[in-house]
Image (cartoon, grey):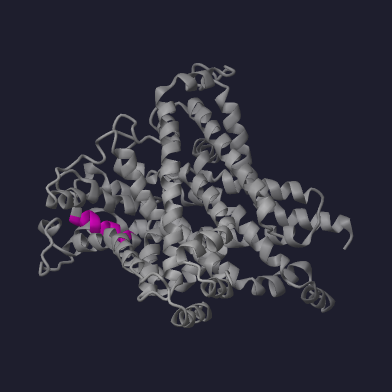
Amino acid sequence: MTPRMANVYGWLLLMPAAILLIAFTHWPTVATLISSVYSPGTPVRPARFIGLDNYRLLVDDPVFIQAALNNLWFAIGTVVPSIALAILMAIWVNENIPGRGLLRLAYFTPTILPMVAAANIWLFFYTPDIGLIDQVLALFGSSGRNWLGDPDLVLPSLIVMTIWKEAGFFMIFYLAALQSIPPELREAAMLEGASRWSFFWKVTFPLLMPTTLFVLVNALLNSFKLVDHLFILTKGGPNNASNLLLYYIYETAFSFFDTSYAATITMVLLVLLALLALAKFWLFEKRVHYQ
Amino acid sequence: MTDGTMTAASARSRVRWPTIRLDWIAAWLLGVLWILPLAYAFWAAFHPSEFVTRFEPFAPLTLDNFREAWTYAPFARYFLNTFLLVTGLLAAQFVLCTLAGFAFARFTFAGHQVAFALVLMQLMITPEVLIVENYATMAGLGLVDSIPAIALPYAASAFGIFLLRQTFKTVPRELEDAARIEGCSWLGVLWRVYVPLARPVYLAYGLVSVSHHWNNFLWPLVITNSVETRPLTVGLAIFAAPESGVNWAVLSAGTLMSVAPLLVAFLLFQRQFVQSFMQAGIK
């Protein structure tokens, strides 16, 4: 095929997808940037260029600062334990543990549920006094807490729920990775008298490293995009103690109708995601070959 | 998989491990803990509301909660909306991603590397992040509060394009050349050689896409505002709002109803689901 024909065919085939990608990914990204440096236009006052004013507002906006910090804690708090649990789960269901199929099912099922449904169920758990957790605590003579109403407890409560929701998903990637580790390695280690513990840290864990990096970056990316549960459980409250960046964007745009400020916060989120994506790209260029 | 565990098992009988598997008890405890929320939802949904926090083994079973949830909110319509959304979107994704994936796999057209990088951008900048501007676009197109508006930003899926490109690249050139000699056109080659060979990938991608969009919430919440377009998740959130005043038992029933089709599908085709998620993520 001539290069000319390759050009024609290639671009023709790509065209439909390209149009939609430009319309709903690239253009809105650019539009967000533009919108963030203009004042919101109203019928009486057209939008005008305000430069970095919105960004200055951002730095002084305590809600934004809190949402950003919350998001950071939410990311770290969900990702690290999820990964640790996922490795543990994968190792267990990779062995011939009795009832392995059921166990894998139990671990994985939360992944299938919509976050909204999961949040509905967890709402029972976290309800003060009559909720399941407080009832269990009462058995041990501990007084109930207002899990979602206490600014110190609300974020950890959301983190616990998110770990429950995500660990099983990450497990399957580790399961796949574990199954690709040749069993001879294990046999050799056993003959050498290695303990399970040292076999894990010296052989399995390093071999799982590419998976861990893959899961880590994806999980971090996820933790900045996952806000569905806030709509059910807290609405970002109490007093923004559980507000996250994307939820704040939603509030700003669709409750306070300040689209230009919402665009400014979106820019921050976009830069964050871009940095994570660059990290991912860099890591995978070095470690994993896709081609 | 079986081979691996068999060898491990036979090896274990030869060499004594220092630990007795106490950790398997931990594994099961964790499993019970993990299934508990769902089990509890079942308990609450199938018992009269006074048993929501009273766990008596012989509490009477009832379907009243489901009946009440079904009549309280237009779940039938929500189901239809979600069904239309996921099937329509999947069809669009298959077509668009197949064409684009084929372009990237087999044509070295000018700028293909830049184009590919631009496509991959969507892996990080997903439509959820761009709700504000995408809402403005939809408003400009007059599509606000329609099912196509929910689907459009996801139709050209970078993930699907990437997945199919990787798969198409593994198809041996000889197969393609043979088909070309037989007089097959480029699209014919795509349809007769590449697509059939990639069938497992379509299945995997389909399962991932359907479960993702069955569960998707934020963008549908933003772009819909009527019963005729709202998918299940959004309907469920409105149903669950404190203002609606339904009790726990009814809420559980509504929640289980919304997740039932996907959950049943998952239980029936567990292996395919897990394998799909794996395949989709590992490539």
Q: Place residue B262 in its image quadrant.
A: bottom left
Q: Quadrant of residue B80?
A: bottom left
Q: Nearer the viewer, residue B19 or A109?
A: B19
Q: Position of residue B173 (x, y in %)?
A: 79, 72
Residue A277 vertical position relative to residue A56 in the rendered view, above or below = below
- The residue drawn where x is 19% and y is 65% is B46
Asked whether A195 falls inside the magenta stretch, the response is no
Residue B207 seen in the current view: no
Q: Is residue B212 visible?
A: yes
- What kind of secondary structure does the magenta stretch mostly adopt? helix
Span highlighted in magenta in the image: B249-258
Horizontal side of B189 relative to A222 (left or right) equals right
Is residue A225 depicted above or below A190 in this figure? Answer: above
Quick check: B155 left or right of A3?
left
Direction front: furthest residue: A193
Q: Position of residue A40 (x, y in %)?
A: 51, 22
The spot of residue B61 in percent (x, y) is 14, 68
